[in-house]
């Protein structure tokens, strides 16, 4: 046993893990350049600091592609050793079915309640007082990424907010640029819509709809402005013609598109491309309107297996994921914020520093994953697919359907 002993304080967990080394298959959907660089830090730490072996189970595509595969394997009796999911409500049914490992002993030994910030991330891993996942980062959707090259080619200053961006769109088109890069996957359009709701409808309206499931507000004037903005965004993204989110990010990196609304995981792609925040690209939290973050993110769950060696390896990995040096190495490459507030991130770039400042200020909101069931989110994604792909689908009609979904939300 190597350095992991110090993480667990040589508790019974640590002693059990000495029984034998294990190969631990870890499934995840981190396959883009920046994501692959980040997850390799987890694998490196696990292989170097424990007696076990990380067996990479990357699943190509987005979370929307990977999650059904992951869940199907667990339900079908072919569980992996560990798997990425988003902390929130995605794993509720698996926990209730008794299929996921209880990590409460690890969390207590490691003092997770004292180090996880904000505490809502650990709350999202908790059901009936027991902890079932290890949160590894804070990811926020609330960002827009802008290409300095694209705006320079169009003879425009880099916008400081959404309204300035919309005003610059005609000049971008004239210069042969796509104003707004947008991939064709449902989660991308649904996520961009979610960013617009907070920036345009405002925090109070967003909370009423997403947290309190207030269908009257969803049908009201604040959300009418959001759907009008989404219709405008749909027009600006009409010539994007890419599928994956990182392909859309690449349009911004190469100056072919003016901007992209995408979570802070896009930052890893800019880093892999050798671009510098503030020089080659600008990042606007809250579309430059509301300086806040939603606190979504990734967590690792550990399906139960009838093998003491596997269980010991699972618990060692859970502890390792939250250790200070691993948190720094992973999040600097991922572009996400760490779940610990007690580590040195002086090496973080300008965009990450903006996120850290917002987090420290307390301007944070729970993510939709923590408030809306997978079924409700799926209905919203289906609506966004129809709306973004059909220019004849009016903002008013889309808003009416959205309000119906919220009225029935669970």
Image (tube, rainbow, N blue to C red):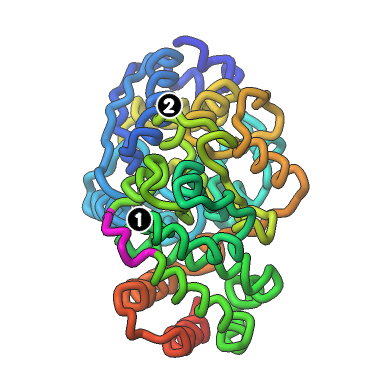
Q: Can you give x and y, in whole percent of width and height, for residue 160 in the image? A: 64, 53
- Mark 1 residue element: loop
Q: Identify which residue is drawn at 31% across, 32% down.
A: 307
In-front residue for pair 322/348:
348
Q: Which of marks 2 and 1 is in front?
A: 1
Residue 192 lies, with reference to residue 379, above or below; the image says above
Q: Can you give x and y, in whole percent of width and height, for residue 182 in the image? A: 37, 58
Q: Identify which residue is drawn at 45% across, 11% down.
A: 1
- Mark 2 residue element: helix
- Asked whether, in this view, residue 103 is left or right of residue 76, the answer is right
Magenta: main secondary structure equals loop
Q: Identify which residue is drawn at 51% across, 56% down.
A: 88
Q: Can you give x and y, in whole percent of width and height, for residue 177 in the image? A: 38, 54
Residue under pointer 2? 42
Badge 2 crowding class, 10 Å Cα cut-off, few under 14, some 14 to 19, many 20 or more, is some
Point out the stretch of residues depicted in magenta.
Answer: 237-243
Residue under pointer 1? 176
Residue 119 lies, with reference to residue 369, above or below; the image says above
């Amino acid at each position: 046993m190597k350095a992991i002993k110090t993480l667990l304080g040589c508790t019974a967990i640590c002693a059990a893990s000495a029984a034998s080394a294990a190969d631990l298959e870890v499934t995840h959907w981190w396959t883009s350049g920046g994501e692959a660089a980040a997850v390799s830090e987890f694998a490196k730490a696990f292989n170097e600091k424990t007696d076990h072996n990380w067996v990479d189970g990357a699943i190509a595509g987005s979370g929307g592609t990977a999650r059904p595969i992951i869940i199907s394997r667990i339900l079908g009796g072919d569980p992996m050793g560990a798997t990425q999911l988003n902390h929130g409500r995605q794993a509720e049914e698996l926990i209730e079915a008794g299929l996921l490992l209880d990590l409460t002993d690890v969390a207590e030994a490691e003092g997770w309640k004292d180090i996880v910030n904000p505490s809502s991330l650990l709350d999202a891993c908790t059901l009936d007082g027991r902890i079932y996942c290890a949160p590894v980062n804070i990811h926020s959707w609330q960002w827009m990424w802008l290409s300095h090259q694209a705006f320079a080619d169009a003879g425009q200053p880099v916008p400081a907010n959404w309204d300035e961006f919309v005003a610059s769109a005609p000049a971008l088109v004239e210069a042969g640029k796509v104003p707004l890069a947008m991939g064709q996957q449902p989660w991308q359009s649904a996520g961009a819509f979610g960013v617009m709701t907070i920036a345009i409808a405002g925090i109070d309206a967003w909370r009423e709809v997403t947290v309190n499931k207030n269908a009257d507000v969803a049908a009201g004037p604040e959300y009418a402005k959001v759907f009008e903005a989404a219709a405008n965004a749909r027009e600006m993204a009409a010539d994007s013609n890419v599928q994956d989110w990182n392909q859309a990010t690449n349009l911004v990196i190469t100056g072919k598109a003016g901007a992209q609304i995408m979570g802070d995981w896009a930052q890893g792609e800019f880093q892999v491309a050798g671009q510098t925040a503030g020089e080659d690209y600008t990042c606007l939290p809250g579309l430059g309107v509301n300086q806040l973050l939603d606190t979504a993110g990734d967590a690792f769950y550990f399906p139960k297996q009838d093998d003491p060696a596997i269980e010991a390896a699972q618990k060692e990995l859970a502890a390792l994921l939250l250790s200070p040096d691993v948190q720094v190495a992973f999040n600097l490459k991922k572009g996400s914020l760490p779940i610990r507030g007690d580590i040195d991130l002086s090496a973080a770039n300008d965009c990450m520093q903006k996120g850290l400042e917002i987090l420290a200020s307390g301007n944070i909101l729970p993510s939709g994953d923590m408030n809306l069931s997978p079924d409700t989110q799926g209905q919203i994604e289906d609506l966004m697919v129809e709306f973004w792909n059909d220019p004849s689908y009016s903002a008013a009609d889309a808003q009416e359907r959205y309000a119906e979904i919220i009225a029935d939300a669970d």
